[in-house]
Image (cartoon, rainbow, N blue to C red):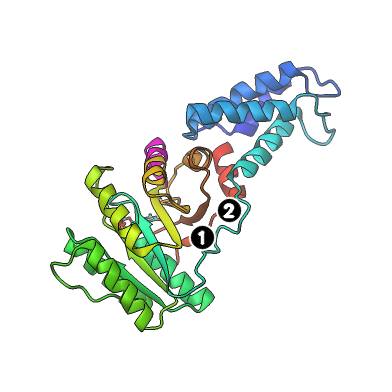
Amino acid sequence: MFENLSDRLGSVFDRLTKQGALSEDDVKTALREVRVALLEADVSLPVARDFIKAVQEKATGQAVTKSITPGQQVVKIVHDELKHVLSGDEDPGKLKIDNPPAPILMVGLQGGGKTTTTAKIAKRLKEREGKRVLMASLDVNRPAAMEQLQILGNQIGVDTLPIVKGEDPVAIAKRAKTQASLGGYDVYMLDTAGRLSIDEELMAQVEAVRDVANPRETLLVVDGLTGQDAVHTAENFDERIGITGVVLTRMDGDGRGGAALSMRAVTGKPIRFVGLGEKMDALETFEPDRIAGRILG
Ligand code: GDP
């Protein structure tokens, strides 16, 4: 397992003289350790480099506080900076869903947790905001995925668009829009098809659906345990489709959360929710503080 960064920095600083302020050398020594911790937490190299530079500027010359050790002090500066980078200025859990029916487009690779997350968000909108939600699966190549959404819908008491065999994703998106308008729904969620990797066909299909639906929110669902792959996925989807936010799933696993930092730094898009299990309630609003703690270990 990973060594705790606070302990590691503590031992580094034991060897350093404790003057009144953090010297440039003290900070440099500490930041070497921080860099290792970031890389171990799966933060990408360029992101770690920029991050370290920002922390270095903040830490150098800062007066050493008597109550805590210099090591703890650097950890605190790093923690605050992580929080700063991870925080968006908006409330991450507040989706833009005024002007009913508001379309939400769900995108991502297969197996990332897209269908599960679609249902989790629908349940949340229904229970916390009293919204009437309609969910539609656009995964025409996988009938099992369409049925899965239906089963989840029944389980949480949220309507799903009836399945019509042979319809293409764009036609389904149009039907969902009509049904949502006629049926007086506040929100309709389009669960697009996933692929094992990003490919041209997938992107073209999602683009066509996007153009028809004109979504208020486009949420990318990615497996938080896949580290750098998750970051590349986010970069690709954002470039091609334009995402408004990210949901990181499987954060109940033992991932270190570095992907969250890289993703935020690379795409500039906020992380909205975190998936913490398979159950329909296992979804939380993203909290920068928690992920920062996780990255630091
Ligand atoms: P999709 O192919 O992207 O639609 O993925 P699914 O929604 O079908 O999810 C794939 C598997 O991951 C299912 O077994 C889900 O129950 C599971 N899953 C989804 N989100 C989470 C999560 O946050 N934590 C855990 N542990 N499992 C999850």
Callout 2: SS: loop
Residue 83 vertical position relative to residue 98 in the rendered view, above or below: above
Q: Which residue is mark 2?
A: 287
The residue positioned 58% from the left and 53% from the top of the image is: 287
Res 172 quadrant in image: bottom left
Q: Start and end of the magenta stretch?
A: 224-233
- Where is residue 69 shown, x and y percent of the image? 76, 30
Q: Give the Cα distance between marks 1 and 2.
A: 8 Å
Residue 157 visible (yes or no): no
Amino acid on which the number 2 mark rests in the picture: Glu
* 72 or 194: nearer the viewer: 194
Res 101 quadrant in image: bottom left
**Left or right: where 139 falls relative to 89:** left
Q: Which residue is mark 1?
A: 284
Amino acid on which the number 1 mark rests in the picture: Glu
Res 233 quadrant in image: top left
- Where is residue 72 shown, x and y percent of the image? 71, 33
User: What main secondary structure does the magenta stretch of the protein show?
Assistant: helix
Check the image and name the residue furthest to the front: 211
Residue 249, magenta (yes or no): no
